[in-house]
Image: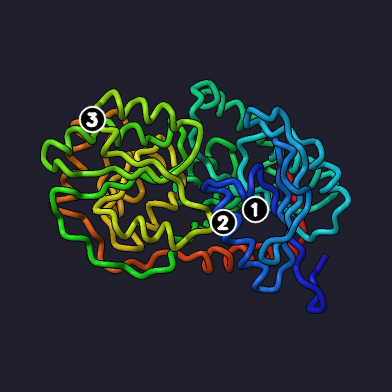
Amino acid sequence: MSVSASRPLRVLMVTPRYFPLIGGVETHVDQVARRLVQSGASVTVLTTDPSGKLAPREERDGVTIERVRAWPAERDYYFAPGLLNVIARGTWDLMHCQSYHTLVAPLAMAAALRSRLPYVVTFHGGGHSSELRNKIRGAQWALLRPLLARAARLVAVARFEIGLYGQRLHVPTERFALIPNGADLPVTAQPLPPLTDAPLIASVGRLERYKGHHRAIAALPHVLQRYPGARLRIVGSGPYEPQLWQQAHELGVADQVEIRGIAPTDRQGMADVLTRASVVTLLSEYETHPIAAMEALAVGRPVVVADTSGLSELAQRGLARSVPLAASSAQVSAVILEQLERPLVPPRLDLPTWDDCAAGLLALYRSIVERPKLCVS
């Protein structure tokens, strides 16, 4: 299956959701897919459409997008049997399965095995607003292990994932490749805005409960006691927005809160928001390699994170201040105030870029295609 110089490497990326939908995985796939095309690869993104309203096939920035119907429309299971036919009839050199949480991953991996198509998997491990879904994660790993163990390589975007998934899946560490997300935005680091009685706090992420925006809202009354003009900008969209507004009204801070998303393609818009912020919070229950935190650091903003998963790595490296997940609103506000008044702003950082991420993936793909082998456990 060697790829000759006369034709491009043909890559199929399979992911539950893709643009125009927004999220961390969607951003990752978009950033690397477009760069792989620019590097000469042929990339098709195979995704689902629970609504049935999106185009079944289109092209965006040289990336071919194919969508199949998924059910049920109102849940995130993404049962999409149409994936099987698309994968079976394709002529790709390699499949990259982006995230494992839904029914998309096992369907795609099973279809690839049947077609003798080598595949790699990036976990994109994350939290979920459903307590039940979080509790059954261990059973899900056990069920997926036979398929994950047969992947040509497993891609981790944060170092802690290698130990976590290696132990829980009984897969040796040498089967993993560490390829972090990018953190580049269309601006360079800017000086912090002068601290006044009206600092701007930004909380970035999809509007789901596990993302922790409610922790930032709960801390805001304490911050307002010291800075009466403080404002909280929640950057995101999603189903948890009504609950966040209700909380803000109950705490009497609705006038100091703004909730508004930014289009996933508007990188300058995100850069502008982060640059105006005095401090950026990411108080999520689980993040693997938090893109928003890395972007905030890239523009020189102090960051407050929850002490969990990939967020903990930032604090351990001295890049952010952390608070325990069980911290009270007063404790959270104390760390926010510390970042406002004695900001921890690391010196110039050598952060990974999306070019680095795409180049790492391309090198991994070529190493697999040039020595094709489906690994068995």
Circle 3 residue: 329
Query: Amino acid under label 3?
Result: Ser
**SS class, disc 3:** helix
Circle 1 residue: 153
Query: Amino acid under label 1?
Result: Arg
Query: Amino acid under label 2?
Result: Ala
For the residues labelled 1 and 2, say whether their Cβ atoms are less than 8 Å apart. Answer: yes
The earlier-in-sequence mark between 1 and 3 is 1
**SS class, disc 1:** strand
The earlier-in-sequence mark between 1 and 2 is 1
Q: Which residue is depicted at the point 51% across and 27% down?
A: 134
In the figure, 172 relative to 350: above or below? above
Q: Position of residue 267 (x, y in %)?
A: 47, 61
Residues 261 and 99: in front is 261
Q: Which residue is depicted at the point 49% across and 59% down?
A: 266
Which residue ends up furthest to the front in the rendered image? 255
Of labels 1 and 3, the one closer to you: 3
Q: Which residue is depicted at the point 51% across and 64% down?
A: 354
Q: Position of residue 226 (x, y in %)?
A: 11, 40
- What's the CA distance linking mark 1 and mark 3? 42 Å
Residues 155 and 235: in front is 235
Left or right of 174? Residue 103 is right
Q: Quadrant of the N terminus?
A: bottom right
Q: Position of residue 168 (x, y in %)?
A: 54, 35
Which residue ends up furthest to the right in the rendered image? 89
Q: Which residue is depicted at the point 45% across and 43% down?
A: 236
Circle 2 residue: 177
